[in-house]
Image (cartoon, coloured by chain):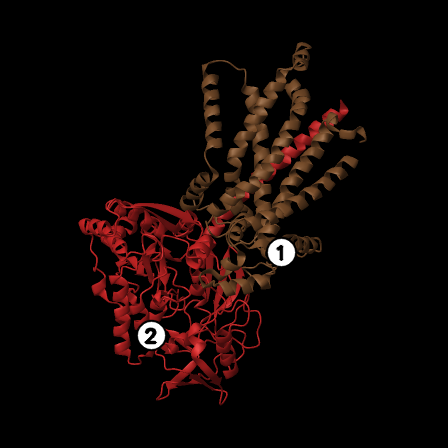
Chain colours: A red, B brown
Amino acid sequence: MKKRISALLLLLILLCTVLSGCGDGSAAGSGEATQSSGSAGAETTANEITVGIAQDLDDSLDPHKAVAAGTKEVMFNVFEGLVKPTSNGDLTPAIAESYTVSEDRLTYTFTLREGVKFHNGDTVTAEDVVYSLQRCADATETGVLQVEAFSIIQSIETPDDNTVVITISEPSNEFISYLTTAILPADYDQQDTAPVGTGPFKFVSRTAQDSVVLEKFDEYWGTPAYLDKVTLKIIENADSLMMSLQSGAIDLCAHLTSTQIAQLGDGFNVAEGTMNLVQALYLNNAEKPFDDVRVRQALCYAVDKQEIIDLAFDGYGSPIGSSMYPAFGKYFDDSLTNYYTKDVAKAKELLAEAGYSNGFAMTITVPSNYTPHVNTAEVLVEQLKEIGVTAEIQLVEWESWVSDVYAGRQFQSTVVGVDASTMTARALLERFTSDYSKNFINYNSPEYDQLFQQALTTYDDGEQTAIYKQMEANLTENAANVYLQDLADLVAVRKGLEGVTFYPIYVLDLSTVRYAQ
Amino acid sequence: MKYAAKRIAMLLVTMVIVSLLAFVAFDLISGDPATAMLGTEATAEKVAALREELGLNRPLLVRYGEWLAGFFTGDLGTSYNYSQPVWELIAPKVLVTLCLSVLSFLLITAVSIPMGLWSVRLDGRSGPLWRVLDGFRTAFNQLCMAVPPFFTGILLTYLFSTVLRWFVHGQFPSLTEDFGGAVRYLFFAAVTLAIPRIAMTVRMLRSTILGEMQRDYVRTAISRGNDRGGVLRGHVLKNSLVPVVTFLAQTMAEIVAGSIVVEQVFAIPGLGRMLVASISNRDYPVVQAIVVILAFWVVLAGTVADIINQRIDPRLRLGGGA
């Protein structure tokens, strides 16, 4: 009996502590909550912001190894090359103060800017430049991605501490664009996790699946960043991201959908730019029935781009007609945009000619993490129905997409956006030459290959541009893919913040963002 | 004591088996860490070189043996994706998920046991008002069980963050720097996790106790003149504890599983999000470590429940030695 009573007592005590503990917790909770909303208000006056990003920086932070577009997008603020891109698509000297190109276009002489500092306090030397470029040219270190355009480098010399001379084996209009390659300190081996560059922001910390912190670099050579500190908060769940925007935890967030923008409320302004992607229904040209140009053209005639933009993107987006987007300026040929207009009769006629008068069934493989592409595919399925083609959407993980579709080329069709790693037409167009390793659609046009060779050996900028445009036309005429649009990049910016700058490449420049005075 | 020692030995064996299974399962699923790491830059040669560097070309058992040896010497390896030691990467997240789970568990026990007892007390009363109340209770209980935590999470966030501003969604403070703030943030997630489990525990407790109340010894006790409440506290509760403890141990395991979803909704940097991300990145060392930690958690909960039950009910003492 005694034992029983003591056991009961024990249970009661346990319950009481649990209950009171919980009561304390919630009471303290609400008390402190008011405090914290006060401090959250105070934080907005501090010169720092929190930026929401939808994907973690979960690869190497070494700019020569980073693969993910999201990682490069952020680390743009930390690293610089000899030259760096500007928002209007030009290049401006960065670590180099100036450069000259020899008469024969084979020798580039760079004069380094005096006293450019790395984030660790060291001064950038010519040796660092040689080390960085050589590292990407050789790519012998595991994980370092080879910059293919560096294969024409014959020598990199340093006649004195402030000069770097690069000699290349054949003239190239694009070579300079690749010198945006990040310059890193030669004697530093922690780039993977604690990167050191020369950009306006220095890397402070990364917490996996949580946040990345950048701070203003006080010894930056150029126009300093306005903000003292930027916290990039990783929130992969779309609903959760929206709630963080509404709660006030996030001040700026790029790549939102039109639906998300509509939910924002009046605390935000919206900046609209372009994503700089070629979104298309990419067709495996080696796979039946897409090995027949008439079938591919029929699909082009079946699709109404504007309807996709209106239905799936609330009207945000710029239609395109080839592997080039408007932000590229001179390389973009708008006459190709409406080369195919929706014409169901014509599409059916082409299908009949190709022997598919009853249509056919096809699979559209879409990476499931990209909602815009999934939504696009859904509209496409409906549009293709009208010409008797039954399309089925197959959702796959991004990793499977990369290994099966992109690397393995085991697919019929896929909806994705293809971007340009550097601001050159080559970056977008070379991939469709027949023997290129990333020609995942197996496009094969001898004429196209020939034009590309011609473009490489043409040094007059105007002529070269004309050839690139011919290549674009070739893709359109042969209906290499069903080109759709360049997605709109909708950025939510808390009222009171300004200075969001868009680039023709996929980067988020934080150095220009500031509180309005 | 001998019993406890036996259980702990079992726990270790279970964990080794779980870790081996996880290792094998990962080898079987499609996708490869080298390809995942290289992303769109993956070419056959690069993938081959990276696989070699990561040691993925060696036989499965050799890799497992190496992992196990590392595990017992406290080395969980290095994350492929983050190039950081796994332990350094996940330790703060283990802490967060642990706090969330413990908080949620405390809520469940603190709320469901009194509620369960109360609902038993109310049972058997007649009259239209009681019938309506009872109907309402059943419906509410069903509702709590049926609504998925991610939805409750969104509702709670809307109410307490967007409208009432009791916490700032997306601003999770560091546990080590601002423990109070972190616990407050976690409280809402813990409630989300707890609601369906509270409903289940209450129902479970109610049916167990009511079942027990039908037993002969209860009737005898009451016929001897004991009052209902006294019998409930003195006899029935103790006899009903065994299934409840077992159920709570299962709940502990389920909380951890549920936290994966809830962490996403509340933007809490816990183990769940880390696990999902590292699975899709094929970051073996991280997945392996998390799987072992979660397995440990589940097995530990079961073991503790067994040991407690065996203390409560001597009939469960196996072997008779203790």
Look at the picture and state if A232 lies above or below A159.
above
The answer to whether residue A243 shows anywhere in this view is no
Residue B99 in the image: state x and y as whole percent: 59, 46
Q: Are marks 1 and 2 in contact (CB under 8 Å)?
A: no
Look at the picture and state if A383 lies above or below A231.
above
Left or right position of A378 against B210:
left
Q: Chain of mark 1?
A: B
Residue, disc 2: A453
Residue A212 numbered mark, or none: none
Q: In terms of image quadrants, where is residue A386?
A: top left
* Residue at figure coordinates x 26%, y 65% from the top left: A474
**Residue ranking furthest to the top:** B223
* Residue at figure coordinates x 56%, y 44% from the top left: B100
Look at the picture and state if A108 lies above or below B12.
below
Q: Label 2, secondary structure: give it.
A: helix
- Tell which of B125 and A157 is nearer to you: A157
Q: Are discs 1 and 2 both within one chain?
A: no
Q: In terms of image quadrants, where is residue A96?
A: bottom left
